[in-house]
Amino acid sequence: MSYDENISILPFEPDDLYRRRVSHFAHLDVHCDDIVMLGDSLINCCEWHELLGDTRIKNRGINGDTVEGVRYRTPTIMNCHPDKVFIMVGINDVSHNISPEDIARSIVSLIDYMHSLSPATRIYVHSLLPFDASYHYSSLAGKEEDVLIVNRVLQELSQQHRYTFIDMYSHFTAPSTQLLAAPYTTDGLHLTGSGYALWAQLLQPYIAE
């Protein structure tokens, strides 16, 4: 697979929520020493600066966002040259029946694009989390292996494309399954306070470095 930051790989059609959030972000500043949490609802639904005890952390999550949705708003973030960007995106693409290879390809292309806009910014990419489609999310049913493929490709390409891969999947999976562990969710996809507490624990070394 080849990767070109100038090519949009996956379809993207912004909805009203996306437009509202983007218009809100336009009135907020990102500075060169800031840390940006970027992605979908898994990012949006957390008070990161409080949880991690760091006022530099800015939340740029949008519920329902996809890889191409993040790409669309990347310049407004990277042109500010933040210190670090942590990305969590891709599960909505899985639910939209995009192939895992194309999802991984799009994420890596996004990272290359981010590097082109702000070469000094350190980029961290979370693995996709497990899920349990038996709760509500029929659009994810049977796609557990897709998540594993996306994660494997992202891990394999991390050195070549100059980003740090953060394994979240293995910490959130119920024993002997491919499912999101029950203590960390109430709907099979989004996280409880305990889930975010674990996430914060896993992030602390990367925030501190």
Image (tube, helix red, strand yellow):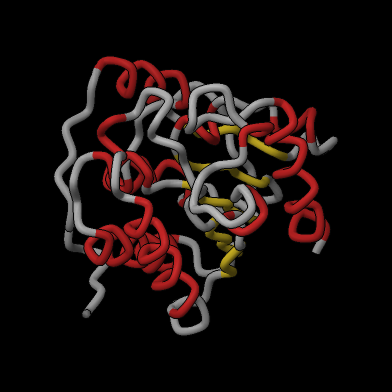
The answer to which of 204 and 209 lies nearer the viewer is: 204
Question: What residue is at 46 percent from the left and 79 percent from the top?
Answer: 156
Question: What residue is at 35 percent from the left and 63 percent from the top?
Answer: 113
**x then y, percent, for residue 91:** 37, 44
The answer to which of 139 and 40 lies nearer the viewer is: 139
Work out whether 15 lies above or below 51.
Answer: above
| Horizontal arrangement in the rendering, residue 87 relative to residue 200 (left or right) | left
For the image shown, how many numbered marks are present on the structure?
0
**In the image, farthest residue toward the front:** 176
Question: What residue is at 51 percent from the left and 48 percent from the top?
Answer: 129
**x then y, percent, for residue 208:** 83, 57
Work out whether 10 lies above or below 42.
Answer: below
**x then y, percent, for residue 66:** 32, 41
| Horizontal arrangement in the rendering, residue 138 relative to residue 176 (left or right) | left
Question: What residue is at 80 percent from the left and 64 percent from the top?
Answer: 209
Q: Quadrant of residue 115?
A: bottom left
**x then y, percent, for residue 59:** 59, 32
- Which quadrant: the N terminus? bottom left
